[in-house]
Image: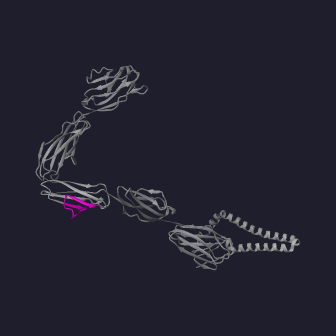
Amino acid sequence: MLQSCGSQQCHQPHDLVVVAGQPVTLPCSITGYHGMVLWVKDGLALGVNRDMSGYPRYDVIGDHSKGEYHLLIQRTELTDDGSFECQAIQAATRSRPARLTVLVPPDDPVIIGAPVVSLRAGNSLNLTCHANNAKPAASIIWIRNGEVLNGAAYTKTLLRDGRRESTVSTLHISASNIENGQQITCRASNKAAPNGKEATVTIDIQHFPLVNLSVEPQPVLEGNLVKFHCAAKANPPVTHYRWAKGGSMITDATGDTYEVLVDHSFFTEPVSCEVTNALGNTNISRNVDVYFGPRLAAEPQSLQVDRGSDAVFSCAWIGNPSLTIVWMKRGHGVVLSNENTLTLKAVRQEDAGKYVCRAVVPRVGVGEKEVTLTVNGPPTISSTQTQQALYGEKGQIKCFIRSTPPPDRIVSSIYPSMLESGTSGRYTVETVSTEDGVISTLTMSNIVPADFQTIYNCTAWNSFGSDTEIIRLKEQGSLRLAVIIGVAVGAFLALIVLIGTLGAFCCARLQRNLKGVVSAKNDIRVEIVHKDHNAAREPEDHGNMKQMMVSWHSKPPSSLFSLTSFTSGLSIRLG
């Protein structure tokens, strides 16, 4: 079995395309090989080495000493079309197959009825052009005044040799689209004749106006001047021009030109020019390539959805050139979508907020529209877990609740009692609604030491669930501590005076008194350290306390607001 050339350095033939009648060379060389070489076409041997006696147009050329056995085909014919291989017999090696494609140009095209076709006004015309014996089949175009005419019908027929084809093209021309003396050309071309071969016919007819509407300049920025020119050819001559925009007449334009300052509407509403002669009229229209900034075509709507549901926003803009749409959440720099539609899957409460649909027309303008996403879900409570107050003064504990829908119940507790909005003894609860949520404030008229040992709980419910927060009250640096320190300092100064007057006799007694004072200070420091130690334990106990409050409130009472304490034994209920 012959192996593909690879173990030796080979120059293999490759696919080639040649026009019939031209020569072509298929290369084959094997470095260092001096044995027998066989050329094969479509599986049939052509000859060994340089012996191509059966094919007078075939020659093997090249330097044998260098292993060169190139196949030269002179004056290629359609029969040469096929697959060629070069085989080194003694080396059991063959080249890859090389496809030789022979192209055949079409015969000169023929227009039926040429060179002159007469046509009466008002009649249509069918022109037929034949381009035969081509490989591949010829493409036919019709040309008038240098412009290609569209709308022709084509048929192709494969000839008996199975390789060449004949093409027939029929062009239908209405009477309103032809003028007297006009020449129409049939051009047939293929890869073998890329420049094509032509046949021309002259039309003898009177016709409706032929119109070309030009717009300058294009593109143009909105607000700039544009000139429309309506060029018409007619036989008989043109008698009238009429201009319109978007179907509405333009009364101040009467000639073959129209100048105007364009806006965005010219991009979607075409300007038309209607030209009339004795036989009738022709109307042609053009849109203007106006550059304009984004204009909102479909306004997005704010949404309110349940947590876990999908939220789908849609907005549409128009602009020119092509605009880019960007969806982002207000205050965030992340692009969420570049489509007209923004889909947020399984939304969470933190997804709520303002979203912006922004459109950008490069170097022209920017537009944006803001919408709001509201997410229905359980309330969320945010509050400082440790709040401060002055002993003996009025103190407050604040609880901020975000809830959509609004909370059905808000409970602030001092275990085991609850307090809703209103006043009971020293306690007053006020609930204020704001744009961002609800602020619940517990006010204590006169802070007592027990208030600093109390655990306060704020809980809110709505139809989706609840949330709770544990809050502790911490004593600020107060007047009471300042008075204690002031008394201690005064006593110390008095003792120094006493020491000066009594002398050495009282020295021992003064030392004992000073020890008592130091003990008093140490007691205060111990108390402070003890408070700090308890405060350090608060984060550790916070989760357990919160879980206990949630369990306690799992069947909430009818009141809306409550307070909870584990130390005060307070029991207050309003309403």
**In percent of the image, x 20 and y 43: which residue is there?**
169
Q: Is residue 255 magenta?
A: yes
Instruction: Find residue 69 and report its image quarter.
Output: top left
Q: Picture coordinates of residue 466 (x, y %)?
A: 56, 67
**In percent of the image, x 27 and y 20: which residue is there?**
53
- Say which of 239 and 198 sits in front: 239
Q: Picture coordinates of residue 233 (x, y %)?
A: 16, 53
Q: Picture coordinates of residue 99 (x, y %)?
A: 32, 32
Q: How is the image coloured?
A: one colour
Q: Picture coordinates of residue 11 (x, y %)?
A: 38, 27
Please say if 221 is above or below 525. above
Q: Is residue 474 magenta?
A: no
Magenta residues span: 242-261
| Count of marks overlaid on the render | 0
The quarter in which the C terminus is drawn is bottom right
Q: Is residue 245 left or right of residue 114?
A: right
Please say if 496 is above or below 292. below
Please say if 273 is above or below 187. below
Q: Is residue 277 left or right of residue 550?
A: left
Instruction: Find residue 298 and report its image quarter.
Output: bottom left
- Say which of 476 and 309 sits in front: 476
- Say which of 128 and 384 sits in front: 384
Instruction: Find residue 486 and report its image quarter.
Output: bottom right
**In percent of the image, x 71 and y 73: which residue is there?**
482
